[in-house]
Image: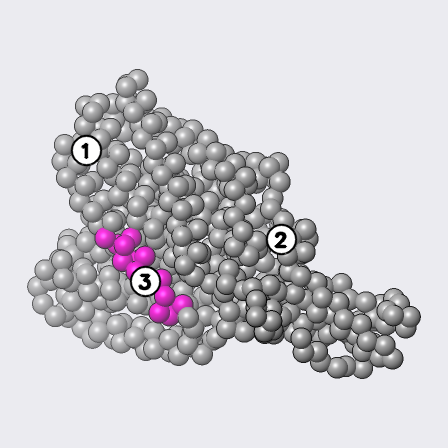
Amino acid sequence: MSQEETQVGTSVIELVSVTPDGTSTPLAHRAHTQELEGVVDGAKAPRVEPNWTDLLSPYQYADSGLRSRSNSSLGRSSFSISSYGSNTSVYSIPIEDAESDRSVRGKSHKQVVRELTVEVMPALLVSVAGSVGAGAVLGHIQGSRAFEREPALLVMVSVLLNLKSNIELNMSTRLSTLANLGAFTAWTDGVDALRSNMELLLLQSTLVGVVVGVIAAALGAPAGVSDVAVLLAVGVACAVVGSAAVGVLVSATVVVGHRAGIDPDNIGTPIASSFGDMSTLLIMGIVSTGLVDQIHTVWPVATVGLFAVLGAGLLRVVQANHQMSHHVTSGYLPLVYAAITSSVAGVIVERSAQRFPSMPALVPVVNGIGGNIGTVFASRISTSLHKQRGRFVASEHNLSMIILLLINVPIQVGFLALRREFDPELQINAMFLVAYTGATAVHGLSMLVVGRVACRWLWARGYDPDDCVNPFITGTGDMLGAILLAIVFIVVF
């Protein structure tokens, strides 16, 4: 094992990976100059207390070209603490021994119950309010002159909300993992993490906006080139501006929550999903009205050109960032899956609405709450896998599944009762209540199972769940929720 000599009074902490054949590879290297009293081999020398969270930061893995996929492939890793003076002492501390440290231990059952009841439940209630608000905003902008002039904008809504929401959820889970690994302990590291993730989010939102505009133009049968330009401009402008707003909100939620002792895994994704949809629809109403009014001017084309230049600049910045460059080409297949399954869900809801007019109003909340508990659970599992270096703490996650499922059902039933007050056409009898409760329980349990299985499957195959798991949960949840609600209405009515 190579060691680096320094003067007496300076200790070097070197994190190395030792493979089964004896080859050692440096992973992290930090010099500590603080001298503490201690005796090593009879000579006064500094003693160093390793900061595990700092040394095991994902940025250290990124610096050495190792990401989460490397965690399970390393043979045996150890810390070597070397002091040089009149006498030389070398301490080799295996990483496995650090499992007892509080930074890598699993959470106690009491802590899990407290976090999920005190932190997750309020966040889910906020997400319900956000879903209801998003539905109200959508109902308002559907009657605007922009949507009347460009019916293809309505085609854009579901795809835009789904794809944009998923990249924002991915950012939330990444930041939550970094916060729990100690990346925000130092101010400079925290700022760097936020900036890097915001740059990636804006780049991905630019791509999403273009794709959404193309899909809307292909399915909406626009009248001419000017209409295509408007659809592209609306798509990319709404995606980028909306993601910028939600990215700031997510960053603030993670940082403030972490500083306040709240686990960001419990609150980040519900806040991102609820306010993301509502803010995007508000922006879409404003932008679409402005651009449709200028449909025969240069403004739509200029808007597309402006965001194309922005996207090209962001691509160069993200590619130059060794911590984030691998994200440029990863995580898109899950987004495609989410887009397809959500489109299928839209078709199911549209056809069911012709027979059951009250059903569409229930879909966003059923899918939203079920999807949120799934993403919260997946975010917690992903963080645990990073902290535990791939070890799955079954007892903790089993308890989390039970608590989240118990939280899901009463919130769903409470929303149903509240909805009944505002929608007299919604007929609620005992049979419907039982069927609805059963459907939401099945939906919530399915989201938890998908999150659990997908996280472990992705991790075992070298993929970071933070980048891939959320689209699987939301896409599956949207389609399954629509199917279950359709079955409930068909059976009861």
Residue 331 part of the magenta-drawn span:
yes
Residue furthest toward the left?
Answer: 223
What residue type is disc 1 on? Pro
Taking the spot 14% from the left edge, 32% from the top edge, the residue there is 355
| Other-residue count near label 1 (Cα within 10 Å), few / some / many at <14 / 14–19 / ≥20 | few
- Residue 332's label in the rendered image is 3
Quadrant in the picture for the N terminus: bottom right
What's drawn in magenta, residue-wise? 327-340
Residue 136, how many percent across, how many down? 30, 43
295 or 1, nearer to the observer: 1
Mark sitting earlier along the chain (2/1): 2
Please indicate whether residue 359 sits to the left or right of residue 387 in the image. Answer: left
- Residue 357's label in the rendered image is 1
Mark sitting earlier along the chain (3/1): 3
Residue 419, how many percent across, how many down? 33, 30
Badge 1 marks a residue whose secondary structure is loop
